[in-house]
Image (cartoon, rainbow, N blue to C red):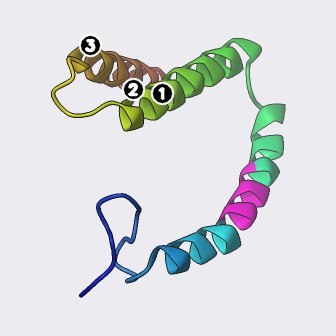
Amino acid sequence: MGGNVTDRVASNMGNAIFVAAFLIMVIPLTLARLFENWKEAADKLDPRDAIVGVVAFVLLAGALLIGMRLRPGSGATWLRVAALVVGWASRSRSSS
């Protein structure tokens, strides 16, 4: 009874196909909205802030991708700490 949810993502939609279909519909709309707002914000953005934002995004995305591939207890505590530090630094930078 039930599907194999240990090897694939089923979320709470009941089947991995439903999750994939939802993401296929939502991701292009999200990207279009992101690029539209990014273009408006880029006109008001200082180049230094843009570089800091891109670097923080790349570091956080890289830490997320590496973290998804690592198993719990594999000695990746340094990665979690690094992601927290980068997230905290980018948050404190944007609030000032």
Apparent side of residue 84 relative to residue 65 in the rendered image (left or right): left
The quarter of the picture where residue 83 lies is top left
Residue 69 picture location, percent across and down: 40, 34
How far apart marks 2 and 3 lie (CA) works out to 14 Å
Which stretch did the figure color magenta?
27-34
Quadrant in the picture for the C terminus: top left
Q: Tags 1 and 2 in contact by the CB under 8 Å rule?
A: yes
Residue for badge 1: 60
Residue 88 picture location, percent across and down: 34, 23
Q: Amino acid at mark 1?
A: Leu
Using the image, determine if residue 55 lies above or below residue 17: above
Mark closest to the chain's N terminus, 3 or 1: 1
Pick the residue in front: 4 or 89: 4
Mark 3 or 1: in front is 3
Mark 2 or 3: in front is 3
How far apart marks 3 and 1 lie (CA) works out to 13 Å
